[in-house]
Amino acid sequence: QVQLVESGGGLVQPGGSLRLSCAASGSISSINAMGWYRQAPGKERELVAGITSDGSTNYANAVKGRFTISRDNAKNIVYLQMNSLKPDDTAVYYCNTEVTLRYSFRTMTSWGQGTQVTVSS
């Protein structure tokens, strides 16, 4: 089994910062890619940022220059540093990971439980 535990969400004022973390555990041989998605009420879930096994990153246009994704390969943790937060960033943020499992070496995708980020004055 693979479990993703998210933390770091909360309530901040516009212009503030938060750092989200997502720790992967379980029968993991390797993590191929990790990313952050978000979903606001009435809107579709969208990719915010992603990082692949070779370290390549990509960002949604709405967060470029403000958000930074990084990972700790040894600890199987991915981070999302969010700066200059705006009310439009308010959403539930979900961690997503593609892993190769131990024993079976099967590739699978897992989702975290979601963490609420609210940006409000």
Image (cartoon, helix red, strand yellow):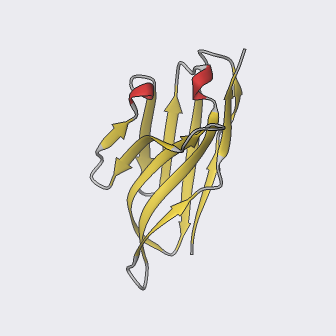
Dividing the picture into quadrants, the one containing residue 120 is top right
Q: Quadrant of residue 33?
A: bottom left
Q: Is residue 64 above or below residue 9?
A: above
Note whether residue 48 is visible.
yes
Observer able to see residue 75: no
Q: Quadrant of residue 100?
A: bottom left
x and y percent of residue 92 in the render? 64, 41
The residue depicted at 38 percent of the width and 28 percent of the height is: 61
Please tell me which residue lies in front, 41 or 96.
Answer: 41
Work out which quarter of the rendered image holds the N terminus and state it. Answer: bottom right
Q: Is residue 113 left or right of residue 24?
A: right
**Residue 50 percent across, percent down from the top left:** 40, 45
78 or 84: which is nearer to us?
84
Residue for point 57% across, 45% down: 21
Q: Position of residue 102 (x, y in %)?
A: 43, 79
User: Above or below — where is 6 with respect to 100?
Assistant: above
Name the residue located 50 percent from the left edge and 54 percent from the top edge: 96
